Each structure stands twice: as structure tokens, then as C-alpha cells.
Image (cartoon, grey):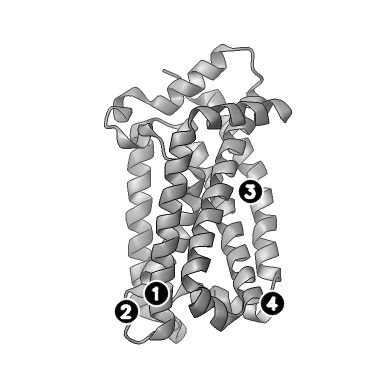
Amino acid sequence: MSQALWLALTELRRRWIGLAGGLLFALFLGLMFGVLLNGYIRDPETANMNDLMVDYLLIAVLPVMGTAFSREYLSWSSLKKDPFLKRLGFLRMWPIPLSVIVWSRLIYSLISYVAGTLALFAAMTAVGWNGYVSQWGLPLYGFFLLFWFGYGLTLCGLFTCLEFGIRFKTYTVISFILVFALFGGLITWHVLDWNQERAIFERVLHLVQTYEALPGLAACLVAIVFVGLWKSVLTRRITRVDLP
């Protein structure tokens, strides 16, 4: 594990610009989230799109906080060059155990996720300090964030498996399908207005109001289990993928 941590930290030092860009983007998203949520809390009846966008930011964006910004996502040439698989191929050239490579990828993702999510939550808290934070109370707000932290942590390993387990073209297609499918699903959910309680974040809020820290702790426990699952999936994919 120490070797995997060293490998992950070495890459983070080399790619610090990407991580810094990811943190700035996380701060921007946190500010946007805070403004939307403040608008919805002040007047739920007239804030028609606010609840939908808050749900989308929490459900769709949090899991991708584990992917630090890098030039691979900003260049069309990545569709042809498969930069993630090339990097994986470079690592496989050296006498590095497969388990070390897999854990290094997961640790890299986890560090990026924790840093990005904390930045996002900090911006959310700053914007909503005199709004939803004071209205809900600090303990309840903390339980609310704990649940969403565990949720995002549960799924962030999925994108690491996609990055280093399939071709970049396929990864791009799957990402677009997930984005539009999730947005369409959330619109359908909100239009149906099931139980007169459209917003998913409101359901989570009611959950933590009832059970306090328990939902958040359960989400974090599930996330720990999923880290082991993503390790197994990524190990299997790396042994089967054709490296360029």
C-alpha cells in the first residue's frame, strides 16, 4: 500500500495543475449549488428549476469529483490516442505489481475526490451560512453533507474503472449516455411529482432529520465496501484490456 501511495502522490505532484483546476471548478459548483439551494429554500413554489438542478449537481457531479481536470479531457486527440491506456501501458512495462498499480489509481481518485468535494462543500457552506445552514442547523447540515459525501465516494471508483478499463472513445460515449439518461430520469421524476415531494435532496434531508447521522454513516460504510469492489473490477479489466 505504501508503494501505491507513493506512486499516486508522485503523479499528483506532476499533475498539480489539473488538480488545482479541478478544485477551482469544485468551488464554482459549490457557489452555484448554494445560490440554487438558497433560491429554492426561500420560495419552493416559484423556484421551478432550482430543485432539479440541485438534484442533478448532487447526483451527477459529486461522483466525478474523483477525476482531476487534465488535458486529456480538453483535447480531441484523446479520442485517437487513448492517453489513459497509454499511461497504463507505460506502468505495465516496469516490474510493478498489478495490485500496486490498481491501488495507486484508486488512491489518486480518492485524493482528488476528497479535495474536490471538500472545496465544493466549503463554497456551499459559505453561500448558505445565513440561509439553509442556519435554517437547518449545523448538526443537521453536517449529517446531510455526510450522506452525500458517502454517496459520491461510492460511485467515484466507477470512472477510474472506465478510464483505465476501456478505450477513450467508448468511455466518452458511455459518459454522454449517462449524462443524458440521468438528466432525463430526473426530469421525469420531477414531472411525475411522486408523493408531492419532488426533490431527491429533500427526501435525504427528511431522512437525516429522522435518523440523524445514521444515513450518512451507512453511506460511508457502503462506500468503503465499494472501494474493494472497484479494485476487483479494475484489476479484472486491466488484465483483459488491449493496451496500445
Label 3: which secondary element: helix
Above or below — where is 1 with respect to 41? above
Residue at 42% across / 66% down in the picture? 33
Residue position for label 2: 48
Label 1: which secondary element: helix
Mark 2 or mark 4: which comes first in sequence?
2
Query: From mark 4 to mark 3, how far is it between C-alphas?
Result: 23 Å
Mark 1 or mark 4: which comes first in sequence?
1
Tag 1 near tag 4, CB within 8 Å: no
In the image, what residue type sits under mark 3?
Phe
User: Who is closer to the viewer here, 238 or 201?
Assistant: 201
Q: Nearer the viewer, mark 1 or mark 3?
A: 1
Tag 1 near tag 2, CB within 8 Å: yes
Spot occupied by residue 15 in the image (x, y as percentages of width and height): 48, 31
Mark 1 or mark 3: which comes first in sequence?
1
- On residue 51, the disc is 1
- On residue 226, the disc is 3
